Every structure is written in structure tokens, then in C-alpha cells.
């Protein structure tokens, strides 16, 4: 077959091109954030050698860009499914599974915290500002982890357990254990695992005391 006889390779579809461009922007931004920068969309576009207009077509706001990076960073974590029937084991499993990846993408997760705090400050001076970084990925995972406690704890007690766990499952932990106490990654995971056990132990103790009080009052 001569060169002229060879079928021409079809150009990539627009969808493929757009996906590559979006991927380039996300990868570039994540690299910059992981190096400690907090770049604007324009700065990300420049680093990716794309036009500012192109970048804004994909990510019209800083929130949109950070949300995309968080989804990319936490993707495998968000797909987590428990393999154990016991709440103690599930919590330990979730923390062991999630924290290595959260620490790997610490820069991006800190960017989400930074943006959330910035938007809170902006909302104080401009209550009509509608740009919000939607957070709350941990809610579904924590409910899944404590699911074996349903029926063993009252709904109110179970919700309190979830609220308590939300304080040790998330990037906010970095600001306390790493920035203030200067713990390394292993130390952070050790403390969060210990706190997880303490939360469940207290919840179970409270449930036993409530059951005893109920039987004595009859």
C-alpha cells in the first residue's frame, strides 16, 4: 500500500480534545498547589501554556478548579467500600485507607481549606456572594463506616458519633497535628486511629449507661 493509499487517521474528537485540555489544566494546577503555591486560574493557564480564555471556559471560578482537583485527589477514597461488619474495624479501615492519599495530596486539600476560609470571610462583607466551594464528601463515608451501630445507638447518639468522627477524618487535622504539634505522617495516623477508638468506646459506654438507667427506672 502506497502512502497515498493509506487511510488518513481521523483527528481526535472535540470531546477528546476537551478532555485532554481539562486534564492538562487539572494536572498543572495540582502540581502547583502541591509545591505550595495558590495560583489563580490565569497563572495555571500560563503554566499550562494555554490562553486565559481557554482556562476560564473550563473553570470559570477558583471554586470550580479546586473542586475538580479535590475530586481528582480523593477519587479512590470516595469509592471506598467497607469489608468488615464491625464499626470499630470499619473506622480503622477507612482511616488507614484514606489518610495516606490525603497526605499525598495535602497541598490540594489545604487549598480547599484556604478557599473555604476565604469565602467565609468574603461572605461576611458580601452576604450575596453565591460562589461556594461545596464540601462534605466525608458525610457518606462516615455514615457507611458507622452503619453497624444503627439500632445499637439512638439516632441522636449515632449522629453525634458521626459529628465527632468528622473532626478526625479530613484535612483540617493537618492544621492541628502537623502545623501546631509537628507530627509526621505516621504520628497523625496514630493519633486519629486512637481518637477513633476513643469515640466508639465512649458512645458504647453512654449507651450501656442509658440502658441501665432505663431498666432501673422501671
Image (spheres, rainbow, N blue to C red):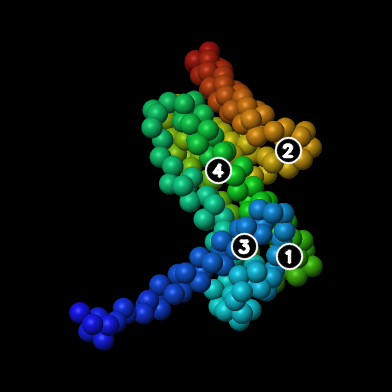
Secondary structure under the numbered disc 3 in the rendered image: helix
Nearer the camera: disc 3 or disc 1 = 3
Q: Is residue 119 visible?
A: yes
Residue 36 lies left or right of residue 51; in this view the side is: right
Q: CA distance from mark 2 to mark 3?
A: 23 Å
Q: CA distance from mark 1 to mark 4?
A: 31 Å
Spot occupied by residue 163 in the image (x, y as percentages of width and height): 59, 39
Neighbours of disc 2 within 10 Å: few (<14), some (14-19), many (20+): some
Spot occupied by residue 171 in the image (x, y as percentages of width and height): 64, 45
Instruction: Tell me which label, 3 or 1, sits earlier in the chain.
Output: 3
Residue that numbered label 2 is attached to:
178
- In depth, the one of 43 and 96 nearer the eye is 43
Neighbours of disc 3 within 10 Å: few (<14), some (14-19), many (20+): many
Neighbours of disc 1 within 10 Å: few (<14), some (14-19), many (20+): some
Judge whether 49 appears above or below 141 on screen.
Answer: below
Q: Residue at coordinates 39% horizontally, 28% vertically from top-left?
A: 85
Nearer the camera: disc 1 or disc 4 = 4
Instruction: Tell me which label, 4 or 3, sits earlier in the chain.
Output: 3
Secondary structure under the numbered disc 2 in the rendered image: helix
Q: Residue at coordinates 53% horizontally, 22% vertically from top-left?
A: 204
Judge whether 21 appears above or below 153 on screen.
Answer: below
Residue that numbered label 3 is attached to:
29
Q: Residue furthest front?
A: 2
Secondary structure under the numbered disc 1 in the rendered image: helix
Q: Is residue 195 visible?
A: no
Amino acid at each position: 500500500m502506497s502512502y497515498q493509499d493509506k487511510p488518513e487517521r481521523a483527528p481526535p474528537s472535540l470531546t477528546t480534545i476537551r478532555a485532554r485540555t481539562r486534564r492538562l489544566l487539572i494536572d498543572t494546577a495540582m502540581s502547583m498547589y502541591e509545591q505550595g503555591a495558590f495560583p489563580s486560574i490565569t497563572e495555571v493557564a500560563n503554566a499550562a501554556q494555554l490562553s486565559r480564555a481557554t482556562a476560564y471556559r473550563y473553570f470559570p471560578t477558583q471554586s470550580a478548579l479546586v473542586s475538580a482537583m479535590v475530586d481528582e485527589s480523593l477519587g479512590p477514597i470516595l469509592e471506598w467500600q467497607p469489608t468488615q461488619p464491625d464499626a470499630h474495624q470499619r473506622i480503622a479501615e477507612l482511616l488507614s485507607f484514606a489518610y495516606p492519599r490525603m497526605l499525598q495530596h495535602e497541598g490540594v486539600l489545604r487549598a480547599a481549606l484556604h478557599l473555604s476560609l476565604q469565602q467565609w470571610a468574603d461572605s461576611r462583607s458580601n452576604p450575596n456572594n453565591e460562589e461556594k466551594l461545596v464540601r462534605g464528601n466525608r458525610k457518606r463515608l462516615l455514615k457507611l463506616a458507622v452503619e453497624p451501630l444503627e439500632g445499637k445507638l439512638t439516632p441522636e447518639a449515632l449522629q453525634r458519633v458521626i459529628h465527632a468522627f468528622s473532626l478526625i477524618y479530613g484535612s483540617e487535622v493537618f492544621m492541628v497535628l502537623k502545623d501546631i504539634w509537628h507530627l509526621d505522617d505516621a504520628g497523625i495516623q496514630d493519633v486519629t486511629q486512637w481518637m477513633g477508638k476513643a469515640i466508639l468506646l465512649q458512645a458504647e459506654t453512654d449507651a450501656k449507661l442509658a440502658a441501665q438507667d432505663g431498666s432501673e427506672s422501671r
